[in-house]
Image (tube, helix red, strand yellow):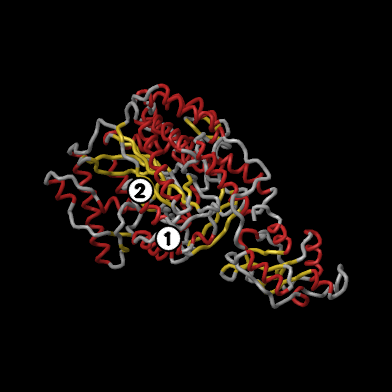
Amino acid sequence: MGEHSVQTLETASQRAAFIHYLIQDIRALEYMLQNDLIESGITRIGAEQEFCLVTADWRPSDNNMEVLKAIDDDHFTTELATYNLEINLDPVELKAGAMKSVHHQLDDLLDNAGRAARRYGTNILLTGILPTIGSRHLGYDYITPSPRYYALNQILKEVRSSDFQLHLRGVDELSIIHDTVLFEACNTSFQLHLQIDPNDFVSSFNWSQAISGPVLGVSTNSPLLLGRELWSETRIALFQQSIDTRNTSYALKDQRPRVSFGKEWATGTTVDIFKDNIAQYPAILSTKLEDDSYKMVQEGKIPKLRALGLHSGTIYPWNRACYGVGNGKPHLRIENRYIPAGPTTLDAMATFAFWVGLMQARPTKFDNIPEVMDFREVKNNFINSARAGLDTFQCWDGKRMSTEDLVTKELLPIAYRGLTNSGLDKETTENYLRVIEQRAKGKTGSKWLTRNYRKLRKENKIDHSLRLLTQHLHQFEQSGKPVHEWTDIACPAKADTPPRYVGHIMSSQLFTVHEDDLANLAIEIMQWKDIHHMPVTDHQGKLTGLLTWTHVERFGQPPPLDKDLIVGTIMEAEVITTTPRTSIQEAITHMKTNEIGCLPVLQKGDLVGIITIKDVIAFDHDPSA
């Protein structure tokens, strides 16, 4: 969504006016295709690199506007959250030296961004999902102050008629409701662009869909969200749910999400892809429009098709058809949107080269893919790759193959041929595709992240583990080595900076009892789990009291107590609580002043954790504290 000055469609007249321009854009595009006005015979590549900004203690920053101003380069632009920025790389013709040129520019721009960020005590990081993003970083204060982001947040909430719900299940399970669109901002991508000749666009688009599963499977880098281990590429499910405008109802309705892989193969021409998007997805945003694109093209002028571009920018297929104008010439391109950022620029460029090589050397048997492969099998490949990465099988050309075998035995030879035919030298081609081959052997970013997070969690709390993980991500990224060469984090590891807030050291895996439960049950659980403090909740899960071993002993040496005694009878109803954003030192002071051994932690009235004397002692003995 490139337009910065946008508005919501609040009235019938506003909607009618925007739809008029949208239809005129479709007519103009049809005219240009029919009269061979779309550029052909040349292939260009381009990319958009999103990246994260992190504080000195490896948490999301809130200063993207200051960093952007310090960078002072038109290649950079904002993203939805204050902890993200984006680089728009220059398009280059696909020929000898093209990939090196893109790689060098990406490194140079990231170096410039890093220098600017460090002036504000901030680091930059390439990663699909920043591990240290917490629920507080999804608040309204973290939306980048721009009309288009506020408008997007407003209209999506209005269309949904509810807050945003997220439910993901992997090794762990995450279920949360939030009141802003910032779930979407957790996603950080490396978006790839490839110019396509108009007469081959539909075949190329279908081929891009067919290869999405294995390309994603060998590129996964986002297994963690809010401290939960979920999918190998959690971004795929997260992005779909984060801006889902569909409403649930008692009726079974076939509604398409605005983030989608699609439902069927593309047919007809490029215009039919855009027509289908307009028919399936209502317009939600507009901007100031004055030029009639159909009249312009009949007068020999080249229109930008701004209405069509804005509408397409509010729909997020994983492979997206795009129209653009460069150097006064209109062109068509495919945008690959499913590749995660990082973990290094070498990894990113290797994936780019692999994808471009595959796109440039499509075997002739796949020119008419609907006759060769079933669309639902291809879509299933993509979803399975997002869920399990390399640990899945792909349906390919009537065969069932592991992702490793499909990539190394079938697809890499095609990619080699495609890059060679495009003029890339042998050394460059081998350097990039060798990275893909090694990743296919089980060494992706998601594998490294998952393995090391599990290792860190054995000796550290969640927040500390996530900060250590992010710190080492940055260190390895700075080394420039591709992820398949990364070593494991040495344990026990220490973070550069100590934790500051209750939320950083609290226990979030809670054992609770209901106020109407039998007291003997609560006592047994406390003994089984060796805990001395147990929060008590009502039927809505709200905190109503606290049960401690001291309270229990007032009623006699347990167990057992009176068999009819309930928790509500012996619990402490007047409970002193704290919040995740309370400083650790303040929490310690509260416990000392009130002579209590714990503080339940509440966020917006909900119980999210507990901090105890044991946590404080561990904090006091942490050398990094």
For discs 1 and 2, the disc positioned in front in the rendered view:
2
Q: Amino acid at mark 2?
A: Phe
Q: CA distance from mark 1 to mark 2?
A: 17 Å
Disc 1, SS:
loop
The correct choice, above or below, for 423 with respect to 198 in the image is: above
The correct choice, above or below, for 104 with respect to 624 in the image is: above
Q: Quadrant of residue 540?
A: bottom right
Left or right: residue 382 versus residue 540 is: left
Would you say residue 411 is visible in this rendering? no
Q: Position of residue 269 (x, y in %)?
A: 28, 40
Q: Residue at x 43, y 31 (%)?
A: 354
Q: Residue at x 88, y 70 (%)?
A: 557
Query: Which of 62 and 326 lies nearest the eye of the viewer?
Result: 62
Disc 2, SS:
strand
Mark 1 lies on residue: 143
- Residue farthest to the left, as pictured: 299
Left or right: residue 593 versus residue 325 is: right
The correct choice, above or below, for 284 with respect to 352 in the image is: below
Mark sitting earlier along the chain (1/2): 2
Query: Which of 530 and 294 lies nearest the eye of the viewer?
Result: 530
Q: Position of residue 65 (x, y in %)?
A: 39, 56
Q: Quadrant of residue 591?
A: bottom right
Q: Position of residue 351 (x, y in %)?
A: 45, 35
The correct choice, above or below, for 242 with respect to 556 in the image is: above
Would you say residue 128 is visible in this rendering? yes
Q: Position of residue 198 (x, y in %)?
A: 27, 36
Left or right: residue 577 versus residue 534 is: left
Q: Amino acid at mark 1?
A: Ile
Query: Which of 268 and 81 lies nearest the eye of the viewer?
Result: 81
Q: Residue at x 29, y 50 (%)?
A: 309
Mark 2 lies on residue: 76
